Amino acid sequence: MRAGAVDRRAVDVLARQLELCRAVPGRPATVLFDSACDPALVEAAVLALEQVDALPTPVCVDDPPAEGLVGTPTRPDIVVNLINGPAGAPEALAPPNTRVLSVVARTAGELRGVVPHAGLSRRVKRGLALLDAGQELHVGDDRGTNLRIGLRDARRWMHDGLATAPGQTAQWPRGMIGSAPGAGTAHGTVVVSPGDVWLPMGWYARSPVMLTFDGGRMARIEGPPSETDAIRAHLASVGSASVYRFDAVEIGLLWIDRPRPPALFEPGFAEAFGVGDHHGHVVIATGQFPTVGIACCLRKATVAVDEVAVVRSGRLQGDLAPDVYEQAAHRFPL
């Protein structure tokens, strides 16, 4: 399969990520796609696998093999999944213990600001270790946010974009750590200020809205009707009482290069690729998986674990901040 134009930057970025995932030269690999995928992204994935000396086979899931990939003559070493659809589709097709790298970018162009680097995985793992060792997480800012959640017996997760172990599935480009609080421990206020982002609706906050949490549930939504009416309408449309349950705090660690920092209300940035994982962004979410209530992305929050700041006014601190080697990779990208 060959598309008309080749995005060489996307090819190089994908190839570097495949090297970090330890794609094995000379081994078969599969690219999963469907008719909705960007043809340039499919082309980039195939060429990237060839660049690392793998042996790629593109497979369109609109007309999959009768026995999935298990029925193919050669077992793939890695599957590059380009389908942004229901979870589980690539795993159902892939043979057992096959690694799957799910590319969450929608187009080849969205990969141009990504700089694959092992430092991201190191930062993600260090951040997860901080959450594992902590007793309390505090989110605050100078606009009235003052939220505390208990970390004892909390559920934690991470995304570092690496699929290196047999049977491992990774989403890429992603970089974040997250924690669901201990039962009933979330309490305090979250102030969503102008320029913050309401997810998954994908719009900017235009006026301050205060969310009050008590005993792990959202007790009040306060602010001008122009904002709160839309939020309440969204929650009602989900049709589940679980949307008022506090779900998680997530901290973005992904560094995507942009020509300049985004303006406060930059057109398109609120729904841009990777906005929730953007380094220094903090996402507060309600609901109960797989049901999503609301998720607000705070762009200038401060986060502390046991009163030690890991994010300060939207800037990563300490073990979560990129080191000089990762910074150099962004100054002199591929």
Image: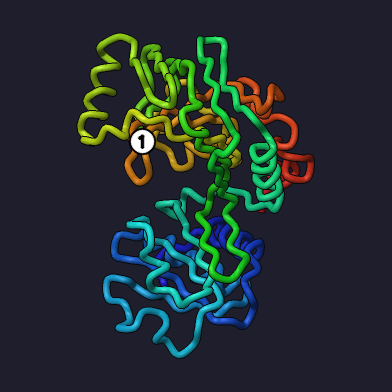
Q: Residue at x 50, y 55 (%)?
A: 171
Indicate left or right for 121 with 269 as reference. Answer: right
Establish if 66 lies above or below 88.
Answer: below
Residue occupying image coordinates x 57% and y 29%: 150
Q: Is residue 113 visible?
A: no
Residue 165: image quadrant is bottom right
Where does the image place residue 318, in percent across and percent down from the top left? 75, 32
Q: Nearer the viewer, residue 299 or 282?
A: 282
109 relative to 253, above or below: below
- The image shows residue 90 at horizontal and vertical percentages of 40, 67
From the image, tell me which residue sits under label 1. Answer: 287
User: What's the residue type where badge 1 is placed?
Assistant: Gly
Q: Nearer the viewer, residue 63 or 304?
A: 304
Estimate the x, y position of residue 192 in percent, counting from the top left.
Answer: 43, 18
Residue 304 shows in the view = yes
At 40% from the left edge and 52% from the top edge, which residue is drawn? Answer: 106
Residue 214 pos. (x, y %): 43, 19
Q: Kindly state the secondary structure of the residue where label 1 is placed.
A: strand
Tell me which corner region of the image, top left, top right, bottom left or bottom right, holds residue 197: top left
Q: Is residue 310 above or below residue 214?
A: below
Q: Extreme bottom residue here?
A: 73
Q: Quadrant location of the C terminus? A: bottom right
Q: Residues within 10 Å of mark 1 (few under 14, many from 20)?
A: many
Quarter of the image where the N terminus is located: bottom left
Which residue shows up at 48% across the image and 41% down it?
Answer: 274
